[in-house]
Each structure stands twice: as structure tokens, then as C-alpha cells.
Image (cartoon, coloured by chain):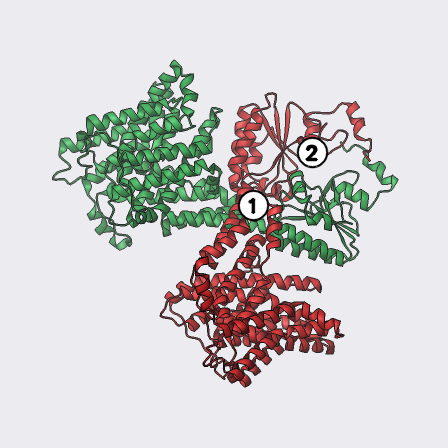
Chain colours: A green, B red
Amino acid sequence: MPLLGWARGYSREDLSGDVVAGVITAILLVPQAMAFSLLAGLPPQAGLYASILPPIIYAVLGTSRTLAVGPVSVASIMVAQALAQAPTTTGHLTSALILALLGGALLIIFGLLRLGLLANFLSHPVLSGFTTAVAVVIILAQLPSLLGMHLPISWSVTQLPQLLTGLHWPTVILAAFAVALLWLSASPLARMLHALGMSARSARAASRTAPLVVVLASTLAVVALRLDGAHGVAVIGDLPTDLPTFGLSVPTWEVVAALLPSAALIAIVGYVESVSIAKTLASRRRQSIDPNQELIALGAANVGAAVSGGMPVAGGFSRTMVNHDAGARTQAAAIITALLVAAVVWLFAPLLAHVPKVALAAIIIVAVSRLIDVRTALAAWRYDRVDGAVLAATALGVLLLGIENGLVVGIVLSLLSYLWRASRPHFAELGRVPGSEHFRNVLRYTHLQTWPHILLLRVDEHLSFANTAYLEQVLMQRVAHKPQLEHLVLVCSGINGVDFSALEMLLRLAASLREAGITLHLAEVKGPVMDRLRDTVLMQELPPGRVFLSAHEAVETLAPRSAGECSVQVTPAA
Amino acid sequence: MPLLGWARGYSREDLSGDVVAGVITAILLVPQAMAFSLLAGLPPQAGLYASILPPIIYAVLGTSRTLAVGPVSVASIMVAQALAQAPTTTGHLTSALILALLGGALLIIFGLLRLGLLANFLSHPVLSGFTTAVAVVIILAQLPSLLGMHLPISWSVTQLPQLLTGLHWPTVILAAFAVALLWLSASPLARMLHALGMSARSARAASRTAPLVVVLASTLAVVALRLDGAHGVAVIGDLPTDLPTFGLSVPTWEVVAALLPSAALIAIVGYVESVSIAKTLASRRRQSIDPNQELIALGAANVGAAVSGGMPVAGGFSRTMVNHDAGARTQAAAIITALLVAAVVWLFAPLLAHVPKVALAAIIIVAVSRLIDVRTALAAWRYDRVDGAVLAATALGVLLLGIENGLVVGIVLSLLSYLWRASRPHFAELGRVPGSEHFRNVLRYTHLQTWPHILLLRVDEHLSFANTAYLEQVLMQRVAHKPQLEHLVLVCSGINGVDFSALEMLLRLAASLREAGITLHLAEVKGPVMDRLRDTVLMQELPPGRVFLSAHEAVETLAPRSAGECSVQVTPAA
């Protein structure tokens, strides 16, 4: 129970840090929770309820001290897209609860099976391309709320005047104020307050209240100027004044089958996002994250969301950063945040009805615009064209094929590129650095010593079904180019494993070489590989071929040095 | 044009070998072609026509000298299963032609894209489990023809008497004779003929005529005893007496979409089977196979099958072995075989109508029973539990979920197991072999020299998204266990690549270690990896960490030896 880890030595300093962080995070969370429910196409309480029980469950089970669990932007837009394709007989809210339930159950199962490492199969380029494109999708989805109008799917420049007349000006004016305030608060405002004499930390904390200020000011404007009536500014509308009630309608098998793929993708993306931010912050404080326990904690939080009327949850990037920077030291901060949200729902729900949707849209747009990351895309492209292409393909896939399909395209491409690389391993013919026991690639170093009757080949890859055919082909070609060859020494220092397909290939190779009068030897076979090979037919078939400790030993045995050469060796190089 | 390779130097000896092999293969092919069409649920001419044009096309384009292209058992049963699920508006024969067309087109495209290596992703265990299970499926599918009855899907021992009364005794008696003769001919007959004074080669050739003898004898019995009338022995029935006519009905997009997945799997399995047998035989004669040209040749052969009324084709294992053993030296043998099949169709079609189906069922069952390979399954299980499990899962998948689904299960499992292994790379902490420049795993060798302020860690795997999270976790754990640590040297001799995800991980790692007062160094970075890393942020972030040529150089720099130790080094070990 990770809770006991931090609760046992809980101190007064912990409490003061946690209270401040809990309050600041709650101030950010209330408007975000409502905004993300609207983004998901759900009533606002789906996000508020998801901010109460789930973070408390995570506080008990999770291994991160500062992760802020609740509704998040990426999961919300994925929920929206999943609901758009869901069976229409089930209501949207019910479907969202089932998504949380199924996703949570899957994460718990993965956690019990200790499959935390599987999350790594979302590579960095896939995740980066995915996040950037999803941010664009979210911004496009929020534009109608921001401008108070329906936007056509496609439009040309000639339609621009017509579109401009369609703008709902009261909404646009509110939007302009909200976006400006939120942009400014990001860092110019904190710098300004700091310059005016406020401490850096208080200035940062004050700037964090911007979303609350936006919500309060715009709601006041709506109420005072009656913008929601005659002026037609869209508002959230009535909220239930109750705390969440517990219960769950058990879904039918058809509904489960229809929602399971989406639930799995939403849960996995949420998990990966949560763990990556949790790890980053944990390493800053020399704490550690257990990926398998995280699966269970986030799974339980999602099940908690489902039974208390909340949408799918995850650890949010921006909110966790705020919580951490505001001084949170343990998950007590998250519990304080959750209790504050519950208090707001219980006491102030009638007031929330007047919050204009445009304020929430502005909060979302400013938050997710920080997720658009062109720098990483350029760095990936410069470092490795394949990784860059995978990143671009994932982003394009999300934009053109939808979020889930784009993600699947990215995962499949990154796996294929991985296998493609493994299928064409790097090879080196080795020669000896004169006067040493070192062997190097003959194409990279000059003056290396080689022998006409010995070929030393180093293969730089795990031998497996993915590369056996290629290896067999290249080895036979190399052999064909050395007419005086008597000994082929496979230097295995780069071979970290030999699977069954490769074992069969080595057997074939040894037999083919023997027919051609060439003996196959192995050298520098690593311990774990040798353990495997020891009892196989290969070891019985290899002689007169041998397994040498090193390339050096192989050469000493197959081409003994003269005494003169030997004296070169003992001269120290440095 | 590979044809020119062998046609240019064609000799009299080539001709005599090719004529004998061509005739013997034709004797085997005519009954097999009819048998495989029935197995696929198609009229007999679908197999006969597939034995005429396609091998001639392969003879012109293919790089194997002895591969016998035509209908094969595995592709036939896959066609049967695909047709069972195909849209009913298209006739079975038309659908089979479309399968050949689509599969052929795909292979040609793969060939032009030079994707021959992709076929390796069918690993040895997957292929072995698949073939064994498909052989079982084929035998079960032929049992009703062999016993002259419909078999219930499941039956209990109490139903056995009832089932036995359902046997069609004339058919069963024919079946018993046919199976007995075919079993005997496999090797006992050849040995017996050899013992009676026939040359070993002639004896083997004579035993190869067994399928023809079975077909002729059983057909004679049917005609003489009028078994097909009152006695109800099933026969092939009328065949068209024409040679194939050329033409193709262009399929609609819906039909293409419905048949494409099956067509792709049939074509890929056929390709892999063809290339593996072609490679085995080519290496015996020091010839070579070009996997990309094979894609084009087999693709064109399938397109040829489609336009001449034939079912999908591939290089058959047993027929190729017969062709090779009978002395075929070039693809001229295949052309002779094809012309003989054409002659049979043209001249003897009315006689073929009386061939009993039971004879063909016996030929198929005896042929495919040799594909059941328990020895490889046991060897795979002994060598590697994971490979053994993949083999078993593929076989079970084929038996329980159908051929295509089983194959997909096998491919997915083998890819997952590959990634799973890559995600938990082998690690070694290194120490120096006293008096040498060699470094070895401290867990595997005793008396190695280590240093409290230096940790030498060798990672034995390509660094990639699949293993970055695990590596980061393990590296930080190792560091935490060495309180006096100042230098972490990552020995990269086993690292054959660093992808973008891993580059980001190394950057994070260097930063985290620096905060803890530890310097990260690299050693033995391979040429291609260094080329990549040279211009990255990592190389700018690394200092004061360094890139050492070897672990030896790292230790010499970070823990200089005393003069006394130095003298130990120059004492030769052997």
C-alpha cells in the first residue's frame, strides 16, 4: 500500500506544502474539469465527479507523490470520438462510464500480469506526433465554442466575409479577453508581478489563478450583462447539486465489444502520459515509480470514476506540473484538491450554471497549445529519418484518419521500422590493430592486420528470425569473395541472443561451409548465449570448428604469431 | 531474365536429366493437380490449368533451377477456407481466380519494392507449427472422401457402431489399397525393387509412379466393376476437353476488399514455402536464389494462373524434391512437365472423368502426413520455451480458429515475443581479468578487478523505445547501490543502434546522474552508432563525461594503475 510509505513519516512541512498545492490545484481543476467534460461531449458533472473519488483512490494506491489524477484533455477528445461511433442505444454519459470501467479493468489486469513495460511500445516519436496532432484536433474542436458559431468542415477564402458575419461578437469579445489573460499569465504576468516586488514563488502562484479569474470574471459579466439571455452567449446550464451517487449499470456484451478497443486505447494513452510525467518528477526528487503498481492505481482510479459517475481519468501533464511547482510533497495534496472540488459541487453548483462555455474553451485552447511540439519533431527528423517519418505519419494519421486510427498507424509503423532495422543488421569484417589484442572494422581503420585464410566477421545484432535469411545471404557472399578462406570466425560480441530460427540457420551454415572446405568458428560468445547453445546440436556439429574466448585467441590459434610480432604486443600503447 | 542464365549454356546432359525429371514430375503432378482442386472445393481443371501456364512463366522469371511450381496442398486448403467465407454472389471458381490474381499482384508489388526480406517475419517456429496443423486440417478434410461418408463434427464412443455402419465399404476398400500402396512406395518398395536387382535410381523412380498407379488401377476398377453407378463410389465426373482459354473477369471493389486479406496470406505462405525449399536445394548445388526476383516470378505465375483459369500456385515441397532427385538440372524440366499436363488435358480428359475421388484423397493424405513434424516442435521447446510456445500456439490457433487466424496469431505472438525479449535486455557489470585488457561479467568470473568509484555496465541490446524505460530503471537502481560511485561507464560493445527514444533517455540519464554527482561516460561505441551520436545534443551534454575507445582505456584514465600492476599485464596468459 504506497499510501503508508508517505503517511508514516508525514511532517508539518509536508502539510503546509500540501495544503497550498492542494488549493492551487483545485482552483485550476474546477474550470478544467468542466471544460474537459464539454470537450468530451458530456455534461459538466462527468468531469467534476471524475475529480473527486479517482484522485483519492490514486492517493492510496499510486507510487507517484505528486501526480494529479483527474480528467485530461487527450482522454477527453478520445472519449468524444469514441462516443461519436458508439452504439446509439446507450446514452453518451453511460457509454463514457463504461469506457472508464473497461479501461480501468484492463489496466488492473495488465498490472496484475506485470505488463507495465508494454507501455514502452509507444515510442517517443509516436507519442510526440500523437500529442501534437491531438492538440490541433482539440483546438479545432473548440473553435466553434470560442467563436460562438458553427464552422463548416471546409471553406475557401471567398467565403471569409460570410464566415466573419457569422461570428457571435459577444462571445468573441469574451474569448479575446480570456485568451489574452491566460496567455499573459503563463509567464509575462509572473515576471511582471515579480518585478513589482512580489516573491517569485507567490508571483507564480498568483499567475496560476488565471483560469479561475477568467471563469469568475466571465461568469460575472454574463450575470451582470445578462449575456446568456438575449445576447445568446452559451453557458453551461444547470448542474445537479448532489455529490456523486455510487452505482453502475452493467453493460451488455455487445456494448462491451463495441467500446473495448476505444477503452483500451484511452486507458493506455492515459497510462503512458501519467507514467512519463510521474517518472520525470520522481527522478527530480530521487523517488521512484513502479510501472506495474501504477497500472493498478490508475486502473482502480478509472473504475472509481465509473462507479461515481465520472469520465475516464489519467494523470494530467499541466495540472501535475502546477501541483508539483506549488509545493506538493505527498498525495495528501491530491486529497485536499478532491475535497475542495466536492465542496464546490455541493455548495456552488447553482453559480456554475452561468459559466460561459467560451471561457472554458479558452482555457482548453491555451492549455493544449503548449502540447504542440515542433522542436521535437525537427530533432527526431535530424537524428533519424525513420523516427522522424514515424512521428510525422502518426501526426498525419491522427489529423486525417481520426485519433485512434492515427495512434494505431503510429504504433504499427514504429514496430515495423524496428523489425526492418533488425532485419538488416550491421556487419563488420575485423582486422587486428597492430601490436594489440584489439580488433576493429577494416572499413573504419587503416593498417589493420588481416589474413587470407581467416575471415573474422562481427554481426552486430541479436540473431533471430527477423534477420536469419539476410545473414545467411551476406555470410555466403563474403565467403565467396575470399578464395583462400579456410576459417570463418563469427565474432559474437554483438550477438545478445540466438533464437530457434537462427539456431537452425547456423546449423545449415556450418554444413554448407564444411562442404566448401571451410570451418566455422565462434568467438566472444556472451555468457547467456553460450548457456543456450551449449546443449544444442550446433555444438556437436561445430567441430573441428571451435568456440574461442576472443578474436585474439582465435587468431593466435589459427595464425600463430612469430616471436618478432609478439614483442610488439608488450610495448604499452600509452 | 533468369531464363537466359541457364538457356545460354544448355548442354546435352542437361537435356537428358531434364526430360527424365520432367516426365516423372508430370506423372506425379496430374493426380496431385486434380486432388488439390478437389481439396480447394474447385472443379479438377482449376488444378490442371494451374499446372500449365504458371510453371512456364516461373521457368522464364524464377531464379531456382528446380522449383516445381503449381497447385500445392497448403494453398489449396487455404483457398477452400477463404471461399467458404467469400461473398456468395461470386462463384467459387471465379473467386479462386481472383485470389490468384490479387495474390500475384501483391507479390509483384512486394518484389518491385524489394520487400523479399519481409517474408522472414514468418519465423521458423510459426512456419513449423503452421505446417503441422495445416496437414492435420487437410487430413481431417479428406477423411469423408476417404471413407465415402459424411462425418459429424463431433461424436462420442457410443456412436461408433452407428458411424461404422455409415462407412461406404467399396470406397473404404479402394482407400485401403491406395493408402497401402502409397505408404509402401515411399521407401519400402524402392528398397525391395533395389534388392530385386534394379538400380537404386531406377527403383526410386519406379516408386514415384505410385500415385499414377493408384489412379490408373482405381480408375480401371471403377470402369470394370461399374463402381460409380450402383455401388456409388464418387468419381471426378466430366472435365472440359479444352486447353485453358485466356481471359479474366475484372472483380468489383467489394469482392477485392473481401478477398484481399485471404489472397495476401495465401500468396505470402506460398512464397515462403517456395523460397525455403528453393534455397535449400540451391545451396546444395552452390547456386543462389534472389528473394526479390522470386517475388516477381511467383507473382507473375499466379497472375498467369488467374488468366488461364487456374487456382493459386506456389512451389510445392514434395514435387520439387521429386523433380530435383529425378535429375532436373534447369527449368526446362518444368516446361516439359507443363507440356505433358497440357497433352493429358487435351487428349485424355474423358478418361479422367472416371477417376474415383477416394484415390485422390489417399494421395493427398499420404503426401501431407509427411508434413507433420513433431521432432522440430520438441527441439524448439527444448531450446527455448518461448519459441516452443509460439509453435504450439500457432498449431492450436490453426486447429481451433481456422488456418488464417491461426497464422495471424502465430505471427503476432512471434513479433510480441521478439519485442518482449528486446524490452528486457541482458546487462552485465564488468570487471577486469587481472593482467589483461579483457573485461568480463563479474557474475560469471571470479577474481575480476573492480573499483568502488567506477561502475562499468555493458548493455547487450540495441537501445530503442522498446527498452528505454527498463534500462533507465535498472541503471538508476545499480547506481543507487554504489554509494562511492563517481563514474558510470556505459560499455556499448553490445549496442548496435540508438534510436530517438533512447537518445532522449540518455540525455535524461546524463542530467540525473550529474545532479547526483556522477559522471556518465561511454566506451566501445561502435562506428555506426558513433556516426549517429556525433552531432547530437548528447555529445554536447556529456562532458566532463568522455567517450573512451575501450573499457580498458576508461579504467586506465579514471583509475590509473601503479607500475607494479602494469608489469602483471605483460605476462602472457598462455
Of the numbered discs 1 and 2, the one sitting upstream in the chain is 1
**Quarter occupied by the C terminus of chain A:** top right
Amino acid type for the residue under numbered disc 2: Arg
Image coordinates for residue B27, horizontal then vertical, percent? 61, 76
Label 1: few (<14), some or many (≥20) within 10 Å?
Answer: many
Chain letter behind tag 2 = B
Q: CA distance from mark 1 to mark 2?
A: 28 Å
Label 2: few (<14), some or many (≥20) within 10 Å?
Answer: some
In this image, B134 relative to A201: left or right? right
* Circles 1 and 2 on the same chain: yes
Name the one closer to the observer, A321 or B336: B336
- Farthest residue, direction top: A12
Say above or below: B258 vs A530: below
Amino acid type for the residue under numbered disc 1: Val
Image coordinates for residue B455, horizontal then vertical, percent? 63, 28
**Quarter occupied by the N terminus of chain A:** top left
Say above or below: A66 vs A71: above
- Farthest residue, direction bottom: B347
Is label 1 in a helix, a strand or a loop?
helix
Image coordinates for residue A492, horizontal then vertical, percent? 68, 44
Chain letter behind tag 1 = B
The residue at 69%/62% (across/down) is B283
Name the one closer to the observer, B92 or B485: B92
In this image, B94 relative to B73: left or right? left
Image coordinates for residue B338, horizontal then vertical, percent? 58, 77
Q: Is residue A389 visible in this depiction of the protein?
A: no
Instruction: Write down the quadrant of residue A565 in the picture.
Output: top right
Is label 2 in a helix, a strand or a loop?
strand
**Residue holding disc 2:** B440
Q: Is residue A549 visible in this depiction of the protein?
A: yes
Res B386 label: 1
